[in-house]
Amino acid sequence: MARALSNPPESAREPDEDYRLIGTPFRRVDGRAKVTGQTRFADDVNFPRMAYVKLVRSTVPHARIKNIDFSAALAMEGVLGTLVGTELPDTFGILPVSEDEHALAFDTVRFVGDPVAAIAAVSEDIAHAAALAVDVDYDILPTIGSFEEALKTPEPRIHDYGDEGNIHKKVSMKFGAVEKGFEEADVILEDTCYFEGNTHLAIEQHAALAVPEDRDRVTVYSSTQTPHYVHRALTKVLGLPPSRIRVIACSNGGGFGGKSDPFNHEMVVAKLALKIGRPCKVTLTREEVFYCHRGRHPVLMNIKTGFKKDGTITSQHLRTALDGGAFGSYGVASTYYTGALQTTTYKIPNYWFEGARAFTNKPPCGPKRGHGTPQPRFAFEVHLDKAAHELGIDPAELRLRNLQPPDSVTANWLRIGSIGLGECIEAVVKGSGWKERYGKLPQGKGLGLACGAYLCGAGLPIYWNHMPQSGVQLKLDRSGCVAVFCGETEIGQGSDSVLAAIVAEVLGIELADIRLCVGDTDLTPVDLGSYSSRVTMMVGQAALQAAERARDTVAKAVASHLDVPEAELVFAGRRVFPASDPEAGMDFNEAVVVAEAQFGTLGTTGSYIPPRAPGRYRGCGVGPSPTYSYSAAVVEVDVDEETGIYDVTHVWMAHEIGRAINPVLVLGQVEGSIYMGLGEAMMEEHVFRRLPKRLSPALVHKMPSLLEYKSPGFHDMPEITSYLIESNDERAPMGAKEVGQGPLLPMMPAVANAVFDAVGVRVDQVPVQPDLVLKGLQAKAKGRDARVGPTKFPAVDYGPPLEVLTPEQGGDGRASDDPKHRAGVRSASGTMKEREAALKERRSATLTTR
Amino acid sequence: MEKGQALPKGVTAAVLRINGEDHPVVFPTHHTLLEVLREECALTGTKHGCELGECGACAVLVDGEAVLSCLQLAAAVNDRPIDTVEGLQQDNDLHPLQAAFADFGAAQCGYCTPGILMVACALLERNPNPTEDEIYEALSGNLCRCTGYNRIVTAVRWAAAMARGDDWRPPEEDFFGTSVPVGDG
């Protein structure tokens, strides 16, 4: 037994025939460190002579910087150095198509909280006081606060690039005969829905510590989910060769997507450390974390779907409008994701997606758990609930009738692997007593059903390259300890445990025989990071390959030593032995001695590159994945009709996991997704307060604190029943799919659908707050439409659609040959390269500082 | 301090009694217990999530009672015993709470864990056999963003049972998931 639970469960289940460790609950490999306080998060790392850094942040939402006056700050005892934007003129950003951020504002600030300058001092108290004493003089520009305002206000532009005015990105892609599909429909439904923005709220505030090692060499410790991308951004901004920068990702105190961008504060501490020659640390306050954001985009959506009388979907047209905030971040990908995965659950033979993202003077939005997918999934699943009522078909049955088949290619050219969605729906339907209870519960109580699908890793890396997306190296030696090196980042999801378990399983050793070295850009092979639910799939495949190569090498040596065929050797119980004669074998460490003697120093590598997706059209890079996970949920609510206040009393969630490597950790992700989904469904909102324009241009976060930004607490949790559906997908390592994001997706629509079943009120927006439910109840009492939600969708010119034939139409994955289509939507202001050249010229016109 | 040598204004010298050991420290008088533990005593197991008393990540025990160390001036507790997560284990054995949290997935990212462990520890000290409701109530001042809470409550129940020598354990579905129902349901 590997590191067993101290108190293992007695299981009536059949032991897995294929595996000893995989599929059995085991203590996570970082479990002991996490309960003893030994885990070192970024702010727990300290160095002698360490200086403390504070950022001076903009107090206005949109302005030109006229002057920065450091004189009062510099007069303070203990101030060690300052930094301004012109010292780091190069731009960075997570996506190569939107490298629009400066370490510190170069000449323009774009939101309240945009960093303008930095101070290093001998203590945090002094750095804080000095930062407050920095006087920044601004020329105020008009504030653009919403998608609609951005659409109406093309000038002044928040950025000098983007598809037009303050619209950052426009997408229009038409797959199949969309109009014909609508003509063939018996019923066409159209809905307008809104999904409010929300934020990750990881309990750990971001921190970064840079240690100078020479004039041109620096190590940066950071709470980041993506050390490789931080490494690339630092290389660009500091202008140093990548070999001189080392990024170490500390264990993240929660990520959820909020630590996936390279951040200003990481660039700033690295530069300051090199400038003043001392280790420099920055730890953000909770308020600053709210302004860092990169969370869920607020999205307004219009969805129109055609159905046959029997419920078959004939066509869908989806339009989305994203409020992106002040920077690109992942926004171009987020825009595509508000349409891309719509086709993965139910067969949509003809599909037209139009999406647009606006720049606004608010903290930048980016990827939060589900990245761009929860919003259209909410719209779709609520829409389907309405369709079921319209068509007189049970909502579960309507979904089952439309299931996308396994091993198929969708209309937008996504290759689907195994699909456990049907089993998921059946599990929650049976578990919740849906057939007996749906539509039949007493007034005020109701059930709602919804589903979802998610990536098991994005098919393409963030920057174009042909290298592995994940790499693993093993070092074996005579001690019998296997050292595993991988760039993956533990953010709490259990990636370290997946990595160690796969290697231990293949080599037949225990978890305690493995030493991990992870998330270190100098020491570990590149892994792209903990995002897009890619780790189990990609790190798992690379680990599997490296471990199998190590096993083969050791087996070869042992086979010749014992004079038995290699194929007969078994690796199990920390021993290597012939299947026919276990006594004849040897301990694992002796086997390594034999191999080391025969082959010299032992090491193996493993890599993973996802299979190429079949799409060949512009924009086809967002959506493909080696395979997809599926989830279905039934939610039960209890609504108080006097107040609109409701409780979620029970959640049944089925998740198709492929195979659970450690079921306890899988269930933890399922339950965590239910929790976070409930927060989004019921209460969380990242919203802003605006004063009348004649008084102030201010646009500030309404509630940048953990107390006022409402998130669920201990008392808000319902009873949870979780089902894990195992399909053993051959595309995945040991059959294991993702679980970190998928189970969140059904929660928001399931809650809205349950509220409808309980009281007959449709709330077509998230969060489904009690005041909205009450508004619907009041309208209903007066005999009016008991629907609450947006009624209008702005007139957005998405440009001519890219037309793509579907697989069923005999297409080849390419857009139709019309050159106007092939070009897609052309940016009004040129490429990022052209923009950078223009920016370089502007660098001579530096701002004044004292 | 040498006799007669005055400390600069705004600085306090104290001997804090932490996890049963004396820690002589000198710190700015306005610094919180959280800051002194982490920065002067190198006890970084105690975490911060807001420094405004909202998240519970910084909870420690003072006189056996759970206290938010971010709201507590260190200078005010220099004569009282303080317990942090670093002092929970006995020699090299984990406290039952620590073992249950590690085994049961009650710690994911582990950042809120030290605070929750200390609040749960105070609860079990005064009530070795708490009901589920009492556990929810005791922990309601702590935020966790990973687990969805229920697993934490069950882990506390499991730890309490272990500490009492009771053989209660979480049900099998908490380790493997609920068996998928068969038949027409």
Image: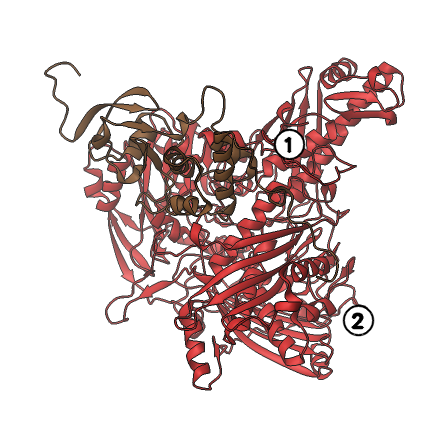
Chain colours: A red, B brown
**Residue bearing the label numbered 1:** A500
Q: In this orientation, which residue lies closer to the viewer: A411 or A267?
A: A411
Closest to the observer, B77 or A559: B77
Marks 1 and 2, Cα distance to the nearest angstrom?
Answer: 46 Å
**Same chain? Circles 1 and 2:** yes
Check the image and name the residue furthest to the left. B4
Q: Secondary structure at mark 1?
A: helix
**Along the line of sight, the residue nearer the viewer: A586 or A834:** A586
On-image quarter of the N terminus of chain A: top right
* 10 Å crowding of disc 2: few (<14), some (14-19), many (20+): few
- Residue at 56% across / 65% down in the picture? A749
| Relative horizontal placement of residue A110, taking residue B80 as reference (left or right) | right
Residue A342 to residue B173: above or below? below
Label 1 vs label 2, nearer the camera: 1
Q: Secondary structure at mark 2?
A: loop
The reply, left or right, for residue A390 in relation to residue A771 is: right
Tell me where residue A816 appears, x and y as whole percent.
73, 70
The answer to whether residue A326 is left or right of residue A743 is: left
Q: Position of residue B9 (x, y in %)?
A: 13, 29
| Amino acid, disc 1 | Ala
Instruction: Say which residue label 2 marks.
Output: A809
Q: Position of residue A131 (x, y in %)?
A: 26, 44
Q: Quadrant of residue A181?
A: bottom right
Q: Earlier in the sequence, mark 1 or mark 2?
A: 1
**Residue type beneath disc 2:** Gln
Q: Quadrant of residue A542?
A: top right
Left or right: A573, with B111 as reference point: right
Q: Chain of mark 1?
A: A
Q: Callout 2: residue from which chain? A: A
In the rendered image, which quarter is residue A17 located in? top right
